[in-house]
Amino acid sequence: MIQEIRKIIEGNVDHYVITRNNGTSNQSKIANNNIVINKNWNQDSYDVFIAMKSGNGYKVGNTDININNDVKSQIKNLINFTKNNPVNENYLGIYNENKKFKEIKSIYDPDVKNINLSSILRDVFDLSLQ
Amino acid sequence: MDDLLKFSINLCNELGVEWAEARFVESNGSGISYENNVLSNNFIGSDKSLYVRFKIGNSMSSVFINSDFSNQFINKKIKDQVRLVKSVNSINRNDIELAEGEVNKKNYTVKQKTKINFSDIDSYINRLKPIISNLKGDNVLNSNISLSTNLIKKSYMNTEGTSINSTIPYIDFFYFLTCKSNSKTAQRMNFYNGVGGWDIFDNWKLDKVISGEVDTITTNLKTAKKVKSGVYDYVIGSEVAGIMVHESVGHPYEADRILGRESAQAGESFIKKDMMGQRVGSDYVTIYDDPTIENVAGYYLYDEEGQKARNRVLVKDGLINEFYHDRQTAKQFGVKSNASARIDNNSNEPLIRMSNTFVKPGKASESSLIKDVKKGIYMKNFMEWNIDDKRYNFKAKGSEAYLIENGEIKHPLLFPDLEVDTLKLWTSVDGVGNKASYGLTSATCGKGQPMQGVPVSMGGPSLLLRGIKHR
C-alpha cells in the first residue's frame, strides 16, 4: 500500500512523508480487583504529509488514509485541499538524508511472550487483598 | 455496514456470548489552525472502523478493527478474543452484569442549514480571517486558533435487537490568547463546539466576541487592582457557573467514578453510593444534564449502548437526585441506565460521560443579584481552574472581574480567586439568575486510557454566592 500511495503522489507534489501505523495491541483494564474489560485493537492506516511549491514558499497538507476507502480519491482530495491552502510560512523543507537505526535487542526479554498473565494477575490480586 | 454489524453480532451469538454490541463508524473531516496569525497546520481525512464489545462468562471484552473488514479477518479476531477472555475468566471474582436495557430502533440525522464541504478550505479561511485581523494588535503577544469539522455516521446493533443509525456534524473552534498591557499579561482560552452546519459557527459571531475580550482584558490590566483578603459575596457569570457545575457536580456524579472503576485514570469522587437524597446545595440549586439540547456540543439522542437519552436531574432543590449511569453501573445501583455511555472514537470503550450540564435558571436578573451585594466580587469569566482528584476542593482564577460595593460595579480586579469546597460552594448559592443571564460554554472533556475527549457543554445563569473567603 505504501508503494501505491507513493506512485499516486510522486510527480504531483514536491515533498512527501508517508507513515504507516499498523499492528495489533491489547489492554486489560483492572479496577477493584477485577478485569473490567479486555481490549483488542487491529489498526492499519497511513499518515500522509505533502508539500507543494508555490511562489517562494510551500503549501502543505496532511491526511490519514484508511485502507478501506478509495486511496486514489483520498490522495486527490488531499492534493486539491493543499492547493487551495495559503503558503505555510512555518514549513522550511524536510531533511533529505536517509536515517537508519540499530535494532535494540538487549533490553527486550523474549520470554515475556510466554508469560502466564492469568497466574500473575491472580497472585497480584490475592497479595493486594491480604 | 449493516452486513458487517449483522455478521459480527451473529458470530458473537454462535460463539455463545451472553451479550454483544457492534458499531460501525464512518467519519469525514478537515481543519485548519493558525499560530500568531500564520497558518500552522491543516488536515483532511476520513476513517471507517468496526467496534465489537461482548460479555462472556464474567468478563467484558472488545475488538476494534479499521484494517481489514473481510468476514474471515473479523471471524478470526473475535474468536481469538473470545478464547483469551475464556482463559482469564477464572481471575474475575465479580461478575460484570448489565441492567435491563430498552430495545430501540431509530435513524436520526442532524441537518445542516449551511452545509459544510470538507474540501472547501476557503470556507474555513474566510471564517477565520475576521477573527485573525483582530489579533494583530500589539496587545496580543501570542495567539493560537483552530477550526475543524467532522461528520460522524454511526450504525449500532446489539444482540437484544437494538438498531440505531445517526449522522451528526460537529464544528470545533478553539482559541488561546496571551494579551499584554501595562507590563502585565493575561491568558484567555475557550472552546466553541457545536452540532450542525456553518450557520452554527456564523451565529457565534466570534470576531466580535474575541475582539471584545481582547479589549476588555487589555483595558482591565491597566486599571485592575489586587483583591484584599476578606470575606466576599460573589456574583459569577454563566461561564464560571459552567466550569463549577462540570467539575464539582458532573464528574463526581459519574457512577463509574463513585464505584472506583476510573480511580487510577480519571480519578475518584467524594460522593458515595449511599448519598442519594443528601443535601449538597441550597434550595436554589437544581442541576440538569440534558443530551437532547439541539445544536450544542454534547448532543445525542441515543447513547453508545443504544439507550434513549433524556434530561438527567442531578441535583433537585439542593438534594442529590440522580447519578450518571451506563448499563453496568445501573445494575450495581439497582436502577435503569440513563443513557450516559459515550465514546470519542470508535476504537474506545463506551464510558460514562456528561453531555450538556447546567444550573436551572431562576427569575432574578443579573443586575438585581449585584444590587443585593454590599461587598463582593463579580467574576464574569475565568482564566484557569483546578480541582482535586475527588472533586471536592475547587479553585478558579477570574479573568474579567470587578469589585462590587453597595450593589454597584466598581473597578476591575486582578485575577481574583474563587477557592471553595464543593459543599460550601453549592450551599452558599443565595440567588439564581434568569434566562437572560444563562449561557452554555463548550469544551472537550477528557477521561479514560487511552484518553477519550468528548464534546460537552456546561453553564447556567449568573449565581449569587454568599460569604466566600478570599485569601
Image (cartoon, rainbow, N blue to C red):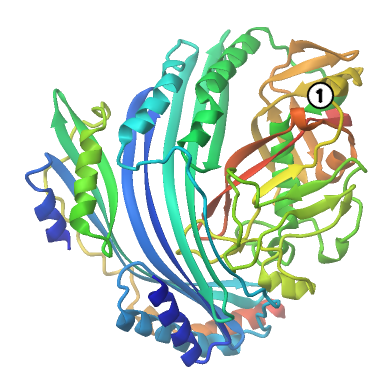
Horizontal and vertical percent for residue B99? 70, 76
Q: Amino acid at mark 1?
A: Glu
Instruction: Let me know if residue A49 appears in the view.
Output: no
Relative to A45, is B456 above or below? Answer: above
Q: Position of residue B3 (x, y in %)?
A: 39, 76
The reply, left or right, for residue B281 in relation to residue B183 is right
As helix, strand or loop, the secondary structure at mark 1 comes to: helix
Mark 1: give few (<14), some (14-19) or many (20+) Cα within 10 Å.
Answer: many
Q: Nearer the viewer, residue B17 or B181?
A: B17
* Residue drawn 33% across the image and 81% down it: B71
Looking at the rendered image, the quarter that the C terminus of chain B falls into is: top right
Give the left or right position of residue B375, taking residue B142 as reference. Answer: right
Residue closest to the eye, B365 or B89: B365
**Residue that label 1 marks:** B366
How far across and down, in percent of the image, does residue A124 sit? 60, 79
- Residue at 51%, 22% in the rendered image: B178
**Which of the pair B306/B229 is nearer the observer?**
B306
- Disc 1: which chain? B
Q: Quadrant of the N terminus of chain B?
A: bottom left
